[in-house]
Amino acid sequence: MKKILFILPLLLTACGTIFSGSTQTISFDSNVKDVKIYVNGQQVCTQVPCSIDVDRESSPLIVMAKRDGYKDGMANIKSKINPTAWFNVLWLYGSFSAATTDYAMGGLWKYTQDGVYINMELENMKHAELQKFRKNSQIRAFSLFNYKDLQMEAALHQNGEYTKALSELTGLSAKELHPTIIESRTEVSLAHNLTGLN
């Protein structure tokens, strides 16, 4: 019994690093093809969609998207304490050594987003084009943030609050929206299917 009590804290040390790793995979996509992605000033992708592994750190990630003829797109991915690392703090025996291991290995931190979608805006847009861009941006944002609820309502053929809100944004009825929602296997594919891809 004493051996088990001695070994158990050792198994639980550095939980954040063991279960989450010291890196995190983050994906990038956009409403525009051939977008170059920069993270903290360094180019990481020559086109989207793409995914990269980044070291977990306490500082945020500054994301910039570039393409000729378009305004630069920006996003800020914040970092927070990794919930898994709290096991170390709460576990009496392993707290100090494990927490310091997690901190050193990056397991103490977790970025708040695993995916970034950037709406790219054409330079020198005319008023009508700008209005369309803003409307499509609203549709894409709504689709990305409410995908699971939209999928549930579509699967049940319900004209619920999420479908009604999307209907108002798109001008399409629930009957027209439901097949598109069901066929879209990811949030991003739904955004693209509703607004197109440049």
Image (spheres, grey):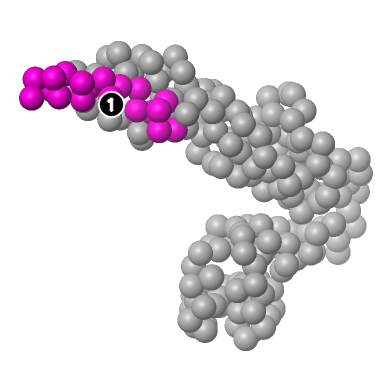
- The answer to whether 176 is drawn above or below residue 151 in the figure is below
Rendering quarter of residue 86: top left
Magenta segment, which residues?
Answer: 1-20
Residue 8 seen in the figure: yes
The residue that appears at 35% across and 22% down in the rendered structure is 14
The residue that appears at 28% across and 30% down in the rendered structure is 87
Seen from the viewer's position, the closer of residues 187 and 15 is 15
Q: Main secondary structure of the magenta part?
A: helix
Picture coordinates of residue 30, whole percent (x, y) = 74, 49
Picture coordinates of residue 140, whole percent (x, y) = 67, 60
Q: Residues within 10 Å of mark 1 (few under 14, many from 20)?
A: some
The residue that mark 1 highlights is 12
Rendering quarter of residue 113: top right
Seen from the viewer's position, the closer of residues 79 and 126 is 79
Which three-letter amino acid code belongs to the residue tagged 1? Leu
Picture coordinates of residue 109, whole percent (x, y) = 45, 27
User: Quick check: is 188 in the magenta stretch?
Assistant: no
Residue 49 vs residue 10: left or right?
right
Numbered disc total: 1
The residue that appears at 80% across and 59% down in the rendered structure is 197
The residue that appears at 69% across and 78% down in the rendered structure is 171
Residue 36 vs residue 52: left or right?
right
- The answer to whether 22 is drawn above or below residue 160 in the figure is above
